[in-house]
Amino acid sequence: MENKGTKLLETEKLLLRRFVIEDGEAMYNNWASDPEVTKFLTWQPHSSIDVTKALLIDWIARYEDLAYYNWVIELKATHEIVGNISIVDLKEKAESASIGYCMSKAWWGNGIMSEALRRVIVYLIEEVGVNRVCACHDSNNPKSGRVMDKAGMKLEGILRSAGYSDNVGIQDIVWHSILRSEL
């Protein structure tokens, strides 16, 4: 495995790129402040644009670390940013990466996130050399699991009462993964 950082990735409809501070307003308005988007996530909706900008300052500073992977999802046709996808846990010795993602509800159900996830999976396996890419979702959010399935991941199982969200409380967590040999 050789870390290569957050490189520009492209799909038919999307650009996956590094965040810039100018993304703050759109990020805040499109998803970071929306309680519906964050309902099943581990963080609360942002209370102000200042919270979003402070987070972006931290993220942008981390791009120098080649073991840091965090993309904004931009629509090629309109250049609108609609979500983000990142590695939330990288286990280098195990060659395993856990992915997290979220997206504005205005674009839910259009295949955007599964397209982004699939591109990140291919990058991590083929270029970085990861053997396993995994992701999880709250059992009350099966639509996130369908995103994983459409991206080629397989259901691994359910960890009962293994997660916590301020919005939902204790929750069952459903894991999906894909291995290098399955790509």
Image: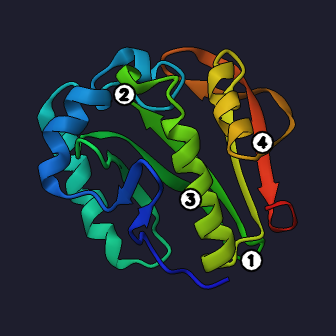
User: Residue visible at 70% across and 38% down?
Assistant: 150
Q: CA distance from mark 3 to mark 4?
A: 15 Å
Q: Within 10 Å of the Cα at label 2, are there few (<14), some (14-19), or many (20+) other Cα atoms?
A: many
Look at mark 2 in the image and give the residue it sits on: 104
- Of marks 3 and 4, which one's residue comes earlier in the chain? 3
Query: Disc 3, disc 2: CB below 8 Å?
Result: no
Look at mark 1 in the image and give the residue it sits on: 93
User: Residue visible at 67% across and 15% down?
Assistant: 140
Extreme-bottom residue of the structure: 2
Task: Kindly identify the amino acid type of the residue bearing the numbered disc 1.
Answer: Lys
Q: CA distance from mark 2 to mark 1?
A: 34 Å
- Of marks 4 and 1, which one's residue comes earlier in the chain? 1
Q: CA distance from mark 4 to mark 1?
A: 20 Å
Quarter of the rendering occupied by the C terminus:
bottom right
Q: CA distance from mark 4 to mark 2?
A: 22 Å
Q: Nearer the viewer, residue 61 or 30?
A: 30
Residue 9 sits in quarter: bottom left
Look at mark 3 in the image and give the residue it sits on: 120
Q: Does the rendering let one see residue 46? A: no
Query: Disc 4, disc 2: CB below 8 Å?
Result: no
Residue 163 sits in quarter: top right
Residue 85 position in % (x across, y down): 47, 48
Q: Is residue 29 left or right of residue 148?
A: left
